[in-house]
Image: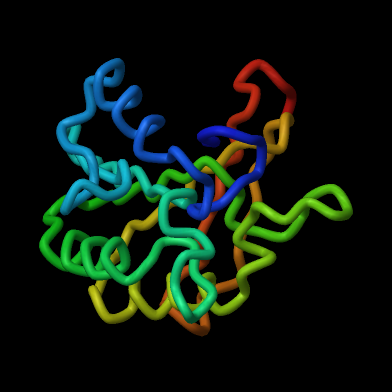
Amino acid sequence: HDFGRNDTDGNLPGKENSRQAFREYRPNPSFGENEQGIYTSFRQGPVEVFLLDARWFAGTEETRTLLGAQQWAWLERSLRDSTAPYKVLACGMVFNGSVRPGKTDCWGRYPNEYQKLLDTIIRAGATGVVLVSGDVHWSRVIRHDTKARIGYDLVEWTTSPVHERL
């Protein structure tokens, strides 16, 4: 979930080296686009998993962003094209703001990005979306009250560490 320093963003010098090391040691089906990021997707039966990269582009664009314009376009296009009944959006940081005081690397600190995520789900017509997150060092399940906005509530599974109690 991090490259370089803990809780860093896409302005970290040398991030290209971290991406290269990741490419050499991880068997992902792809690694972002245009030599940027490490986002990708894969399908296993009725589930398509979208691995989001909330580090590479974070803080690098004029408008405060986590995913960056390139990855947002990829995500919307990929969700729209997916025929999987279940779509897992997986991210190394939590999609909510229930974190320790002062923690800056969570979707809750980027409220416009979270709203953009909901808008992307709507525009793509994506159903069956589930969120999987990590980095807060305990496991939990959170229901996001999104039914009025996207037609169903999003459920977030935080899985770090997996052996922790819910």
Q: Position of residue 150 (x, y in %)?
A: 42, 78
How far across and down, in percent of the image, does residue 83 sit?
12, 55
Between 57 and 17, the residue placed more toward the observer is: 17
Where the C terminus falls, by quadrant?
top right
Q: Is residue 87 above or below residue 58?
A: above
* In the image, farthest residue toward the front: 13
Q: Position of residue 121 (x, y in %)?
A: 34, 71
- x 33%, y 57%: residue: 128
Q: How is the rendered protein coloured? A: rainbow
- Looking at the rendered structure, the number of numbered marks drawn on it comes to 0
Query: 16 or 26, which is in the foreground?
Result: 16
User: In front here: 47 or 136?
Assistant: 136
Q: Report whether 46 appears left or right of 55.
A: left
* Residue for point 67% across, 64% down: 108
**Residue depicted at x 42% and y 50%:** 56
Residue in view at x 32 percent, y 47 percent: 37
Q: Is residue 148 above or below residue 15?
A: below
Horizontal and vertical percent position of residue 129: 37, 57
- Residue 53 to residue 162: above or below: below
- Position of 149 compared to 99: left or right? left
Can you tell which quarter of the image residue 141 is in?
Answer: top right
Which residue, as the protein is rendered here, is positioned at the far right?
Answer: 101
Q: Is residue 122 above or below residue 131?
A: below
